[in-house]
Amino acid sequence: MTMIEKFVDFVHALPADSAQSVEATLAQIMESYSDKYELTPDQLAEMQKRMAEENPEYSSKEAITAIFGKPFSA
């Protein structure tokens, strides 16, 4: 019996509400592996360019506060 088969048997033996919880968790895991979250070639190139900068610039605490609406603690 494969691990997948054991998993399916395990889930089938659970009460319905517990099985739904496991199914929801598995769905989230599966979604995290989808292409939906992969960077485009342009995004990847931009990220690599920025990571290679010797003196990167960062947002000020005020700019972060303006975006998120609450103080950014140091």
Image (tube, rainbow, N blue to C red):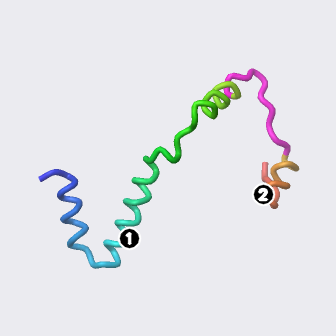
Q: Depth check: give the residue in front, 30 or 68.
A: 30
**Magenta segment main secondary structure:** loop
- Report helix, strand or loop for mark 1: helix
Q: Residue at x 58, y 31 (%)?
A: 41
User: Is 27 on the left-hand or right-hand side of 15?
Assistant: right
Residue 25: image x %, image y %? 40, 62
Q: Residue at x 77, y 28 (%)?
A: 56
Q: Residue at x 35, y 72 (%)?
A: 20
Q: Residue furthest right?
A: 62
Q: Depth check: give the residue in front, 74 or 56.
A: 56
Residue 37: image x %, image y %? 53, 45
Q: Residue at x 85, y 43 (%)?
A: 60
User: Is 50 on the left-hand or right-hand side of 9?
Assistant: right
Q: Residue furthest left?
A: 1
Magenta residues, as a range?
Answer: 51-60
Residue 47: image x %, image y %? 65, 31
* Residue 16: in magenta span: no
Mark pair 2, 1: CA separation:
31 Å
* Residue 56: in magenta span: yes
Q: Is residue 2 above or below residue 15?
A: above
Disc 1 marks a residue whose amino acid type is Ser
Displayed quadrant of residue 68: bottom right
Q: Which residue is mark 2?
A: 68
Q: How many marks?
A: 2
Residue 18: image x %, image y %? 33, 74
Q: Which residue is mark 1?
A: 21
The mark found on residue 46 in the picture is none
- Report helix, strand or loop for mark 2: helix
Displayed quadrant of residue 8: bottom left
Q: Is residue 59 above or below residue 31?
A: above
User: Is 43 on the left-hand or right-hand side of 3?
Assistant: right
Disc 2 marks a residue whose amino acid type is Phe
